[in-house]
Image: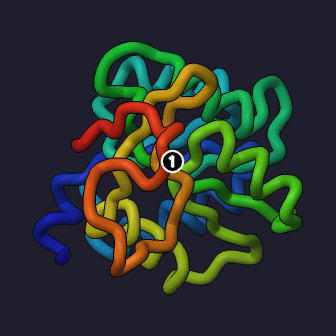
Amino acid sequence: MTIGLRALSILVVDDNQQMRTIIGTVLAAAGVGRIYYAADGRAGLESLARYEIDVVYADYEMPTMNGLDFIARVRAQGGAARLTPIIMLTGHSDLLRLSAARDRGVNEFLAKPVTARNILLRLEAVIMHPRPYIQAPDFFGPDRRRRQSPDYHGPRRRASDEDVLEL
């Protein structure tokens, strides 16, 4: 997997310098080719506009623009950037906050304190097991349903489903 990681560009968006260093050090040691850093959501959006980013790690709580607003802005963009996988870093793993991030279009969660293993497992999840993106009147993002039913056959699981976008 190291050869594939060398081709990746990853953005780490966190207001805590130590957390950016931890995530970046683990990613660099695993062989990630390019790692960019931003101290808040606004700077993260600027980096997304400037560089071709493959995956984003974004903190939940940040000044200027928090992780929820960052995700919403990314998913509202036009073009390929709106499909960028986002891994939410959070020290707040209660259901209310997780649901809020999921409803904004987050792909994966990474609870703090982080471990090298979990940093890389979440990266593997968004790369090796991507979920299809859903376009609905009030949502754009990865399919929020994680369970797969062996009895289900077809693109829709219920009559109210909108278009499913395959990557």
Can you tell which quarter of the image residue 84 is in?
A: top left
Which residue is identified by label 1?
86
Q: Amino acid at mark 1?
A: Ile
Residue in view at x 53 percent, y 19 percent? 76
Can you tell which quarter of the image residue 153 is in?
A: bottom left
Give the percent coordinates (x, y) of residue 107.
51, 53
Disc tally is: 1
Vertical relation: 122 (above or below) 37: below
Vertical relation: 109 (above or below) 83: below
Q: Residue furthest front?
A: 159
User: Closest to the observer: 30 or 135?
Assistant: 135
Vertical relation: 111 (above or below) 89: below
Q: Specify the quadrant that holds the C terminus.
A: top left
Residue in view at x 55 percent, y 53 percent? 144
Determine whether, in the image, residue 153 is placed left or right of residue 108: left
Give the percent coordinates (x, y) of residue 125.
39, 69
Give the percent coordinates (x, y) of residue 38.
59, 36
